[in-house]
Image (cartoon, rainbow, N blue to C red):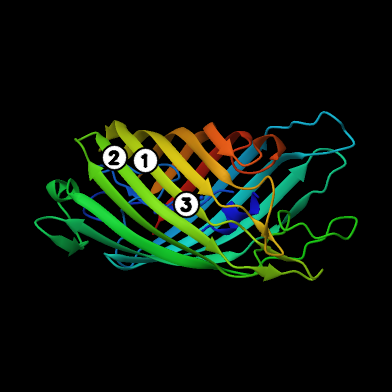
């Protein structure tokens, strides 16, 4: 169900720096950073960069999902598209420790005759700790040379969502559909690891392994529901295509391969049919960095799926025609 992705916004934002002397997904928010020199950042996956000490990040992301429809009968409307917005703030408490807060807004639209739902979703908070490997593991220092930036960089991050949205959103018939609600009703928890390495002056490799875990919630209609836990394994290659040091402009090209494994949802303790499965997305995109601001645009599409009762799934992960990912961010 698509709600899980945006409500679990604590798995990422894209942070930007002015250079190495200064200094991160439904749509997850991805932790990342890129300077005019040094490693690049993927569009959506988390990467191994913390915010500069005492610097503030502002972030906005749009994840527009267009779903494949299967039933041509207009009397049985299906999910048409969804816009998942995420606004966020991040702060660098130390060069190796950053904290973030995100507020998602969901707009889920059915075909004519269906039920549209929109509203603010669950707020998420999380922290990120960064370290590097250079003859041993070390916390990220305040500043690094170009040679230092070529070392392996890693982060550990984790957080949770708070049930600030509306878990009991009712349709025109008065029914509660957890997939249309804007809250899990309970906290969800996420944890992840990243590793990033500059392969050369222009090429960067990025790896993310993370998971999200959900609690069971009893809704106002007396039913219990628990979203399936999820596992992510993301790889990315980023190419620094153009740099103009005088105007402080940089353009990166990126290609991400994102694996997502979903467990089945459970209703009243019973595994739900036509939920869960495995899928692989490709995300090609471009990032523009100018001074301490960034904008990124990518297209995300499933290239392989192995969903449970796949013919019966619609309007969720793995059943998209495509997704458009757009982010803007600035560092102050």
Q: Nearer the viewer, mark 3 or mark 2?
A: 3
Relative image position of residue 163 (x, y in whole percent)? 63, 70
**SS assignment at label 2:** strand
Of the pair 89 and 154, the residue shown nearer to us: 154
Q: Residues under labels 1 and 2: Cα distance?
A: 8 Å
Residue at numbered disc 2: 205
Q: Nearer the viewer, mark 1 or mark 3?
A: 3
**SS assignment at label 1:** strand
Q: Residues under labels 3 and 2: Cα distance?
A: 20 Å
Relative image position of residue 295 (x, y in whole percent)? 45, 42
Q: Which quarter shows the C terminus?
A: bottom left
**Circle 1 Cα neighbour tier, 10 Å, few/some/many (<14 / 14–19 / ≥20):** many
Q: Which quadrant of the structure image shows residue 312?
A: top right
Relative image position of residue 80 (x, y in whole percent)? 74, 38
Q: Nearer the viewer, mark 1 or mark 2?
A: 1
Q: Residue at the spot x=16%, y=46% of the render?
A: 146
Residue 59 visible to the viewer: yes
> Looking at the image, do the residues carrying marks 1 and 2 touch, with CB atoms under 8 Å apart?
yes
Q: Is residue 94 left or right of residue 3?
A: left
Q: State the residue lying farthest toward the left.
A: 135
* Marks 1 and 2, the one that precedes in the sequence: 2
Residue 10 visible to the viewer: no
Q: Residue at the spot x=45%, y=45% of the render?
A: 44
Residue at numbered disc 3: 231
Q: Residue at the spot x=31%, y=58% of the render?
A: 155
Residue at numbered disc 1: 235
* Marks 3 and 2, the one that precedes in the sequence: 2
Of the pair 136 and 34, the residue shown nearer to us: 136
> Looking at the image, do the residues carrying marks 1 and 3 touch, with CB atoms under 8 Å apart?
no
- Position of residue 240 relative to residue 182, above or below, is above
Q: Residues under labels 1 and 3: Cα distance?
A: 14 Å
Q: Is residue 152 left or right of residue 72?
A: left
């Amino acid at each position: 169900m698509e709600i899980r992705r945006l409500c679990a916004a604590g798995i990422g934002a894209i942070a930007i720096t002015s250079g190495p002397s200064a200094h991160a997904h439904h749509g997850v928010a991805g932790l990342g950073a890129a300077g005019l020199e040094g490693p690049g950042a993927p569009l959506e996956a988390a990467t191994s960069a913390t915010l500069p000490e005492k610097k503030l990040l502002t972030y906005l992301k749009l994840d527009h999902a267009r779903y494949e429809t299967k039933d041509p009968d207009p009397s049985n409307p299906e999910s048409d598209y969804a816009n998942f917005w995420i606004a966020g703030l991040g702060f660098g408490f130390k060069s190796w420790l950053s904290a973030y807060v995100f507020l998602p807004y969901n707009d889920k639209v059915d075909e004519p005759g269906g039920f549209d739902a929109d509203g603010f979703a669950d707020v998420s908070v999380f922290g990120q700790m960064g370290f590097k490997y250079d003859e041993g593991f070390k916390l990220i220092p305040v500043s690094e040379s170009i040679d230092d930036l070529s070392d392996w960089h890693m982060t550990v991050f984790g957080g949770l969502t708070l049930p600030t949205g509306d878990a009991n959103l009712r349709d025109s018939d008065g029914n509660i559909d957890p997939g249309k609600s804007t809250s899990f009703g309970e906290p969800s928890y996420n944890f992840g690891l990243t590793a990033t390495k500059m392969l050369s002056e222009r090429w960067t490799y990025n790896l993310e392994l993370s998971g999200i875990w959900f609690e069971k919630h009893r809704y106002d209609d007396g039913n219990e529901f628990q979203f399936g836990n999820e596992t992510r394994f993301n790889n990315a290659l980023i190419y620094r295509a153009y740099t103009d040091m005088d105007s402080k402009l940089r353009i990166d090209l990126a290609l991400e391969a994102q694996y997502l494994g979903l467990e089945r949802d459970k209703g009243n303790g019973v595994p739900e049919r036509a939920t869960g499965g495995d899928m692989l997305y490709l995300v090609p995109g471009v990032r523009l960095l100018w001074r301490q601001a960034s904008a990124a645009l990518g297209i995300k599409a499933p290239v392989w799926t192995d969903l449970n009762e796949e013919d019966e799934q619609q309007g969720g992960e793995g059943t998209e025609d495509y997704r458009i990912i757009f982010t803007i961010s600035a560092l102050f």
